Image (spheres, helix red, strand yellow):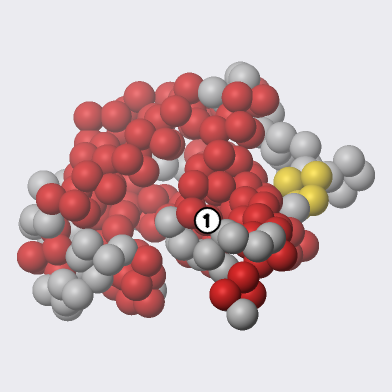
């Protein structure tokens, strides 16, 4: 299988070592007090980004914006390279094994653009935390209806960061990476809350339907 960057039109540049953020003066460890909980132990604490981190994300997105279509494809090619099981969630192209063919797949290109559009909307809402939370929460709910498991959500942020590093070259700093990691961690946790909220709702509706006669359920036919 070929590298996701080959033939993409983006020239690989200088990369940095994987940066794993810890507590810092700019982004201190978020306390658990006041955290909001969803299903399966998922919690979303206070919004994790400070103003300097928001500014880094906004500035880097402006640089990245012209390449979003290519980045969207690269993210998913890398995702399928590193986690092939993720393809099971995409019935339109899950049977395509050739990565070069997959790059040209219109459905994959369209989905990559939708993901980039979600990131763009998230960046635009960094100063509107309620709207950002609602955006990610509703996306998690819709993914439940599409039967897209939450275990895949965090992979997208990881592959996004891996895909954009070569574009920025020396402009990609540990501080920029930490800001993006914090944003994706927040978005992932909020999406998971939305997913499990919708799952509980659908489960409750299903149980109610099984109890009601005349709904076409298994029990009503006994």
Q: Position of residue 149 (x, y in %)?
A: 51, 65
Viewer-nearest residue: 90 or 151: 90
Residue farthest toward the right in the current orientation of the protein: 33
| Residue shown at the point (19%, 58%) measured from the top left | 5
Residue 98 position by quadrant: bottom left
Say left or right for 116 vs 155.
Answer: left
Look at the picture and state if 14 lies above or below 129: below
Q: Could you tell me residue 142's position as x and y percent? A: 49, 47
Q: Which residue is mark 1?
A: 144
Residue 114 % position (x, y): 32, 40
* Closest to the observer, 32 or 145: 145
**138 up-or-down from 90: above or below:** above
Dot 1: element: helix
The answer to whether residue 208 of the structure is visible from this angle is yes
**Residue in front for this viewpoint, 210 or 107:** 210
Image quadrant holding the N terminus, namely bottom left
């Amino acid at each position: 299988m070929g590298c996701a960057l080959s033939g993409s039109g983006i020239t690989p540049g200088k990369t940095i070592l994987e940066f794993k953020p810890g507590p810092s003066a700019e982004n201190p460890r978020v306390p658990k007090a006041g955290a909001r909980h969803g299903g399966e132990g998922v919690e979303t604490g206070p919004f994790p980004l400070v103003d300097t981190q928001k500014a880094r994300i906004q500035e880097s997105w402006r640089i990245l914006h012209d390449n979003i279509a290519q980045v969207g494809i690269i993210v998913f090619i890398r995702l399928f390279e590193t986690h092939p099981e993720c393809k099971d969630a995409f019935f339109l192209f899950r049977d395509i094994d050739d990565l070069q063919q997959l790059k040209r797949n219109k459905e994959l290109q369209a989905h990559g653009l939708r993901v980039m559009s979600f990131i763009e909307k998230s960046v635009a809402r960094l100063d509107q935390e309620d709207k950002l939370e609602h955006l990610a929460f509703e996306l998690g709910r819709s993914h439940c209806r599409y039967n897209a498991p939450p275990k895949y959500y965090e992979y997208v942020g990881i592959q996004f960061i891996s895909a954009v590093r070569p574009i920025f070259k020396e402009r990609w700093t540990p501080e920029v990476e930490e800001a993006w990691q914090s944003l994706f961690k927040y978005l992932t946790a909020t999406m998971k809350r939305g997913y499990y909220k919708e799952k509980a709702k659908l489960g409750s509706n299903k149980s109610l339907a099984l109890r009601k006669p005349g709904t076409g359920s298994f029990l009503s036919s006994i």
